[in-house]
Image (spheres, helix red, strand yellow):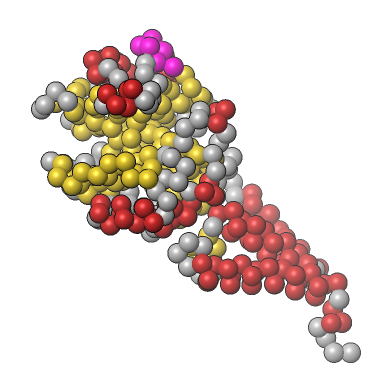
Amino acid sequence: MMENHFVFADLSTYELAITKNFYSAVFNWEYFTEDDRYYLAHHDDKQISGLYETPRKFKDMNMPSFWMSYIHVESVEDTVAKAKTLGGIIELVETENPIGKIALIRDPLGAGFTVYEGDQLNSRFKNTKNALVWNELFISDFSRISPFYETLFHWTFAPAENGRRFILDSSQQQIGAVQEVSNTRKGKYEYWGVFFAVQDTATTKKSVLENGGLLVFEDDHFTALADPFGAFFHVVPLADSSISSKRSRFEKSFKWRALLGLGLIIISLGTGWAWIWGIFFALWVVMDLRSGQTHLFEPISKVQHPVLYWVVLVLWAFLGVYSVLYYLYPEWFWAA
């Protein structure tokens, strides 16, 4: 298992029997337990997810049923200590759990996730039917949580379309995403969403509705659903494996931004219009400010390398102004 990657998900629910029947009908999962308290869902001989009944104190608080994403870490104790300094809320720490060490942490806006130290939970797959394939954070303000995750897990964020950002690990591999959305769409809670790959989303949606679930949201990329107790989950077509793959194939098919950039460079070289370079530098500054990451032969994170990050951004801004002034007032740069 790779450090700081998603590895598992489990579900806290109000009624075990109803919930087991629901997911068995929708995903054809089989549940097994050793203590009648914690159940493991299996499909095609693969361990898929966990299930347990919501504790009474949380029921009394009217806390909704929810899916929880697990992130593998090298040290739970170190991660908990770091999360505290970054404004995270520690809800639970278990260092003597039979499966390994775990801790439930909430980010500065309240989205919860579990960090896991051990080798028994490894249930996120690629292109696997009725299995966990993707994790995505639905949040109301990206700027308030990005430094937290960048520092805690050494993640970086790559801008995508429609307010989304891909989560990149230390080797620049896409491992998840963040969506900045309004409360009218996602509800009042900030949360980590789980995504399951299915053979056909329309068939899965029909099964969910027939078994007491709800349709929450639907677009060209994924379908958001809820079980009978309101726990959100998402499904994507099996062939896509995750909503990142569809985007990647689209981007490979037509890179219009790159082609536009090449066109501007050709125009600049043909006309001598130096001000065109000012457009490039201005766009780089805007994009880097939005993503919290710039590049100079390699990625530079604002959180991990703040001084170098701002030096590079100031350089881009300076070169942008220089390019425009060079075009408007060339006499300033050449001796008469």
Please identify the residue farthest to the right as the structure is shown: 336
Horizontal arrangement in the rendering, residue 304 relative to residue 181 (left or right): left
- As for residue 259 lying within the magenta part, the answer is no
Say which quarter of the image contains residue 203: top left
Say which quarter of the image contains residue 242: top left
Q: Could you say where residue 232 lies in the image, as x and y percent from the top left?
A: 41, 26
- As for residue 209 lying within the magenta part, the answer is yes
Q: Which residue corresponds to the image point at 52% horizontal and 49% vertical from the top-left? A: 144
Note whether 58 is above or below 280 in the view shown: above
Q: State whether residue 241 appears in this view.
A: no
Q: Which residue corresponds to the image point at 37% horizontal and 16% vertical from the top-left? A: 228
Q: Could you say where residue 45 lies in the image, as x and y percent from the top left?
A: 17, 30
Please identify the residue farthest to the top as the structure is shown: 210
Q: Could you say where residue 244 lies in the image, as x and y percent from the top left?
A: 45, 42
The count of marks equals 0
Horizontal arrangement in the rendering, residue 308 relative to residue 258 (left or right): left
Magenta residues span: 208-214
Q: Which residue corresponds to the image point at 26% horizontal and 26% vertical from the top-left? A: 55
